[in-house]
Image (cartoon, rainbow, N blue to C red):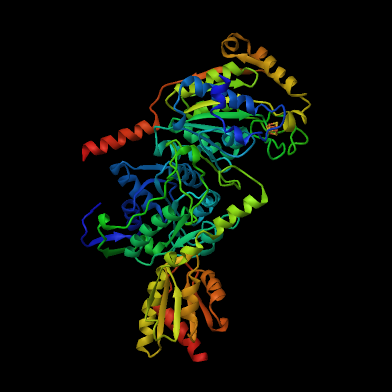
Amino acid sequence: MNRERKAQLLQGNQACSLAAIDAGVRFYAGYPITPSTEIAEFMAEHLPRIGGKFIQMEDELGGMGAVLGAALTGAKVITATSGPGFSLKQENIGFAAMAEIPCVIVNVQRMGPSTGGPTSPAQGDIMQARWGTHGDHPIIALSPASVLETYELTVKAVNFAEKFRVPVIILLDEVVGHMREKVVLPDPAELEVVDRKRPAVLPGSYRPYETDDTGIPAMADFGTGYRWHVTGLTHNEEGAPTGQADSVERQLTRLFTKLDRYEEEITLYKTFKTADASCLFITFGCTARSAAEAVNILREEGLKAGLLQLQTIWPFPRKVVKELTRDKELVFVPELNWGQLRGEVEKYAPGKEKLYGINKINGELITPQEIAARVKEVAKAC
Amino acid sequence: MLKDIEGMMRTGRLPHIWCPGCGNGIVMKAMLEAIHESGLNTDKIVVVSGIGCSSRAPGYLNFDTVHTTHGRALAFATGIKLAKPELSVFVVTGDGDGTAIGGNHLIHAARRNIDLNVILFNNNIYGMTGGQYSPLTPQGRFATTSPYGNLERSFDICDLVRGAGATYVGRGTVYHTKLLTELVKSAIRNKGFSFVEAVSICPVSYGRRNKLGSAPEMLKWLRDNAVAVKAARAMEPEKLAGKFVIGELYRETAPEYTELYAGLIARIKEGS
Ligand code: SF4
């Protein structure tokens, strides 16, 4: 791979892989599935060159298990998959949430349900990313709209995983994953790279789930003498399984709320011409590109449109959504599914009657023209 | 010896959750004796388990330990060993965890010949969920989900992993404890995928339903029906029917996966 920081033609899946390596990822385990395979192929080629490890496991469950095992030894880890494979990973994603193991899972979304459309773009895994595994749990999901953003958000994802000890999901879509764009990447030496907090105490007094005021417990690498126990069972500060109600409640409350105080830092988004807009698009991924062009089309025709592009999908950016929808006459949520993001926007956007979905589920992109046409249709009726 | 073993336990977490008469403690003790006698650095030991009665063992062991999801112990262990090959990685699993839901990982870990020491506690039943039949429940035996007798044939799990590529395979029982310790020691010495089947007893979920008597009676049954490898070789097949073979069943040398990987990294570095 060309490591020179000059303009290069790069695919989304490649940018994601390169960013992971630049952010310190040294372990990949996974199972091939379209349209995510280029990530595995990139990692298979590049990781051993820098002393990292790649393994193609026998199935998706194994891929997820192996990255978690590697993460416990101190490695930064990533795995990549698509729709059905993401479903198979869910149990172990829940384990990562419960045991607080840093890991990044790339889901290059494809059309579903089931085998669906392996090479057709879709954005139908919003809810699967949030609630695919059982039980309440913290999760971060990021969604890029371009090749450069894929690079930037993957670096963020690795950093978030390490800093907060949570599984971080990168919700790519087939369009962004397979698209090639000319990009100039930042110098890896200048990247801000975060490492997980290691214990400052001696092995004998290490309590693996005890926290300081950050709310994030320190994590010891396996094999360094700390000898701690990791389990998916409800556990106490020592890591020992417990069913004691007060201890369980204390730990789970910390787990569920640990990201709350970092909301500002985790909430990433971009706005385009929103200042004077009367009509707002809220969307993400490849659809944000169509929406941006629709903004231009509509403005040429005299309708003041603007765009809020969500890069963080979970935790849901409720504050910015609330703020930006407050004074808008019309709010549209275009997406390649039946309305998964719209449901979330409805929760935080006052005046639900002004909210419209623009949805497409036939395996094709929504074009800027389609978005603009729908807006004009609604505006005329108002 | 007892003292040395005690030091490898999180005694503060006792009493354990196993039923009186359960064989799990005996297997765990044999494993700790083998670790002690092999002189392994206890800071470099990781014990990984899945879900089930036996898979609770790591919670009581004073090493780096992971109690993973059902059937996935070998997947986690593969990640641990590949990421940090200097660690000695043990996998503690049961017959349901290791051969049903985790069967795919078992054959593939064996195929890779990755240096893991797998100890499969075979109690012939799903104990923790209350006594459902497993792939190692003998045909005709009773379980809560085979109330009319099990129709399915059971695996010879040692044959299976051998066929899949394991380089060390042994079978012991909770009656033949010295042998069990020796088998685990040989597994530790083997650089590659090592598999020890520990035939155990579950008087509560399996024994009772199949009228096999109390724990001591089940142990006697193991004593009377186990045949040592050497003796078995000299026996007529008819005489062996209904019995099972114990001892070191298979040993082979083959390239180990993490060493091959290290070689790959070195090769690339040389080439560049
Ligand atoms: S159910 Fe059986 S295997 Fe499980 S602890 Fe009880 S006796 Fe042991």
Task: State ligand 1's quadrant.
Answer: top right
Viewer-side residue, A255 vs B177: A255
Examine the rendering and report whether any part of residue A338 can be seen: no
Please provide percent x and percent y for residue A122: 46, 65
Q: Is residue B79 visible?
A: yes
Labels in figure, total: 0
Name above or below for residue A205 compared with residue B196.
Answer: below
- Determine the residue positioned at 56% across, 58% down: A256
A143 horizontally vs A238: left or right: left
Residue A251 falls left or right of residue A121:
right
Please tell me which residue is depicted at 60% across the width and 54% down the height of the picture.
A250
Q: Is residue A48 left or right of residue B204?
A: left
Q: Which residue is found at the position 77% from the left and 31% from the top?
A: B209
Residue B60 point in image, percent of width and height: 59, 34
> x, y percentage for residue A147?
33, 63
Q: Position of residue B243 (x, y in %)?
A: 66, 17
Observer-nearest of B263 and B7:
B7
